[in-house]
Image (cartoon, rainbow, N blue to C red):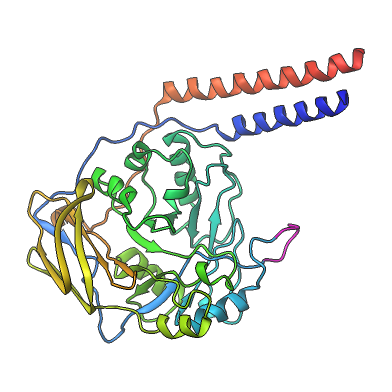
Amino acid sequence: MRWVGKILASLALLFLMLLLVSGISPVYRFAPRAPFSGPDIFNPYASLDTAVGWKRAVFHTHSRVKGPWPVNECPEWPAQVDSVYRELGYDIVTFSNHNEITRHPYDTALQVNVYEHGYSIPQFHKLVFGSDRVIHWDAILPLTASQKQFQLNYLGRSADFLQLNHPYRVRFNRRSHMERLSGYQIMELDTHISTENEYWDWALSYGHYSFGLANDDNHNPFVSSRTGIRCNFLNTPSGRYEDLRKTLLGGCYYAMRVPDYGQGDWEVKRRENRDLPRVEAIGLEGPCIFLRLSEKADSIRVNGAGHRTLKMALDTCAIRYSLPETEPYARLTAFFPDGAVLYTNPFARYDAAKGPFPPREPAPPVNGQLTILFNLLLLALTAGAVYLLCRLWRRSGKK
């Protein structure tokens, strides 16, 4: 029993050392709050082409993968997962397995290099788009905004763009972190918990613009309650990566929460999923944001900075809202009688004379003194863990 205790204590110390070493990072000087402002309004739907129409897509779903791991996060191979989604009316299906770039099951022209990055205990995960290799380094216990920012900066060097995954589920995810972090272009919305997406407003209100995608994050395509319940409609000519990249970074798409139609009756689910409410018109007329839907919604809500409700329209299929010069941005959410919810990308104030919007935010500067002190503290704690481990086994040898 004494040996068992020592082995367990040794494993605990080794794990502590891993936590400490993986947490080494710069300490940043984060920029102060800078709400969007200017005489112009960014319209994410300016490129809308009605002839192209909307294509339904899911970007965050999992599949069975080949490899040395004894346990897969999904029991089905990519071809089967793709088939289930296609039957539900999806046009674009990409596979974002953990730390694995998954090949398209039957058409190399539709290959999208994307993977979910992260081993961390708090589940601070990111979708990495456009990288030809997987970066395996991760902070096991990222507790500070600087540790998270360091990951985003590091991943962004080899990626086209990043998505912050399921912010509702990230443990220790504080509002102050969402207000400080930058270096990502897309926020994942509505991850099975709430339709409010207030964490999106925390970042937007601080001056960090991002588009929004809703995804199943599915680990088994034959579980009805987890499949086909989040989706995105993109105004894109094809599912090729060049087109997807342009659309995802341009903002001409909207996201949806979809009820689990049939609740296990797949025939009903397939039929209802092919007849969802859709956006018929959206855009700007001067300072006026307009939205017209194919079906009447119980309510359409306009949210602005601080997650405030700027306007609410009831029992309607259309809304118009004139964005005041004092309002940094506005985004729209439509709630339908059967439980479906539709989310638009934000319209935001900016100054066209200063360049295109949204701008590529520069990495925050490093605070040199605090960086040295913080990492010396982690190294000192690591050295203490090594000392305890050595002492534990030295005493054992003497006995």
Observer able to see residue 112: no
Residue at horizontal 23 percent and vertical 57 percent from the top: 357
Image coordinates of residue 284 in percent, x first then y, are 13, 69
Residue at horizontal 32 percent and vertical 76 percent from the top: 235
Instruction: Indicate the quadrant where residue 233 lies.
Output: bottom left
Task: Specify the segment rendered in magenta.
Answer: 65-71
Observer able to see residue 246: yes
Image coordinates of residue 197 in percent, x first then y, are 33, 53
Residue at horizontal 16 percent and vertical 67 percent from the top: 314
Image coordinates of residue 190 in percent, x first then y, are 39, 58
Task: Say left or right for 41 vs 213.
Answer: left
Q: Depth check: give the residue in front, 251 or 171.
A: 171
228 is higher (above) or lower (below) than 73 = below
170 is higher (above) or lower (below) than 384 = below
Location of the C terminus by quadrant is top right
390 is higher (above) or lower (below) than 207 = above
Q: Is residue 357 magenta?
A: no
Q: Is residue 67 magenta?
A: yes
Location of the N terminus by quadrant is top right
